[in-house]
Image (cartoon, coloured by chain):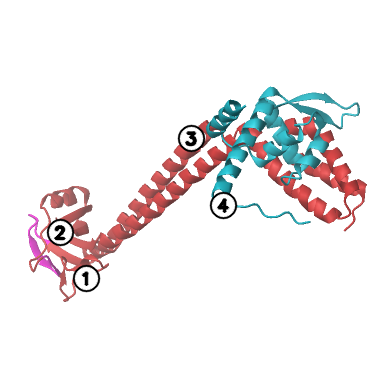
Chain colours: A cyan, B red
Amino acid sequence: MIQGMATLLSQSKESPPLSPAVFAVLLALADGEKHGYAIMQEARAHTPMGPGTLYGTLDRMLESGLVRETGLSEDGRRRYYELTAAGKRSLAVEMARMQHAVKLARAKGVRALEAKP
Amino acid sequence: MKISGAKFLRVYAWMLQLYPPRFRAKHEAQLLDAARLQHGETENHGALACALLGDTMKASLRENLRDSGVASTASLLGFAAFFTLLLFVVMLCMQQVWRRGADKAPQQLVTEARSTGVVPMDGEVREISSPAWVDGRDTFVATYDANGNVQASNGRFHGALPQPPRGIFQMMQKRSEHKVTWQPQRGVRVALVGQPLPQGGYVVAGQSLIPGEASTFSFYRLVLAMWGLMVLSLATIAVWTRRQRTA
């Protein structure tokens, strides 16, 4: 487990950080297949995202093999996507990078702002 | 602000024309569906329209760049080479403009002397090696005999009448006018224009090249800054495009 984390951390140092849009899409798909609009709604919790940005990002993620298209609704209005193994790996590497950054920040005494009730 | 659904979608469908055909063919139905659902979920249609406009402008620019390959490495290198060549040509042209500009006043003087037979030599004596003359735009005139020996001048070089190399007079005889750069000492550069006189001998006039050269060097610095800015901009575009493609 610790060895696995160390591997992910070393990979995170080698690969560039994901853009906020890509990370938000990967995170939205982490719990399973979704259509574009559902991905956009969930991704908006992390980053501003319109439909053009979403489908452009999804196209590039398809090309780089992070997601795959699983189907099209009968009326053609919705395309469904899911994570590939490479997408899951990228998400895990990004998480390791973030955890490492949080650990470093805490060691320096940085504290997160309290969430407003 | 409220906008009817039909009107809202009609405008958004028109905005989708900004995307390249490949992207539009694949995602038009999904984009319109997303806009329809968002329209139904919000009360403030004005804010939604602004957000969709911003999204469309940004995303369509990115997709068009991606499709056209405008930012490919070869295109960027080609543009860099073209821009560098262009700046080089502009530099050469400007250098020539300034150099030839220094010939104008001396040329007028010698042409006037040749046509009237009277050398326009005022009584005021100019010291060519003095900083005031070197950094200014004043001219001097001198006459020379058929062998190129100085006879009279309102200019002095360290107190003596100015005597440029005699070889230039042979060229004046051949071409009926000769323009040359004379550097009698370091830091003193003179644009000389000479013509043979009808009564024999030659008339030569000169102006300092230093002010023009100072302008040329300032321009070179500006060109260098523009070139640096171009390299920086292209590097930024290359990095941005690469990120867009790999993201």
CA separation in Å, label 1 and label 3: 47 Å
Location of residue A46 with respect to A4 vertically, above or below = below
Badge 3 density bin: few <14, some 14–19, many ≥20, Cα 10 Å: some
Compare residues B50 and B61 and report the one nearer the observer: B50
The residue under label 3 is: B77
Q: Are marks 3 and 2 on the same chain?
A: yes
Q: Quadrant of the N terminus of chain A?
A: top right
Q: In this rendering, do the residues under marks 2 and 4 share a single chain?
A: no
State the image quarter where residue A49 is shown.
top right
Q: Which residue is mark 1?
A: B132
**A31 left or right of A9 in image:** right
Residue B42: percent from the left, percent from the top?
87, 51
Q: Height in image: A69 above or below B154? A: above
Looking at the rendered structure, the secondary structure element under dot 2 is strand
Disc 1 crowd, CA 10 A, few/some/many (<14, 14-19, 20+): few
- Return the residue at label 4: A109
Q: How many marks?
A: 4
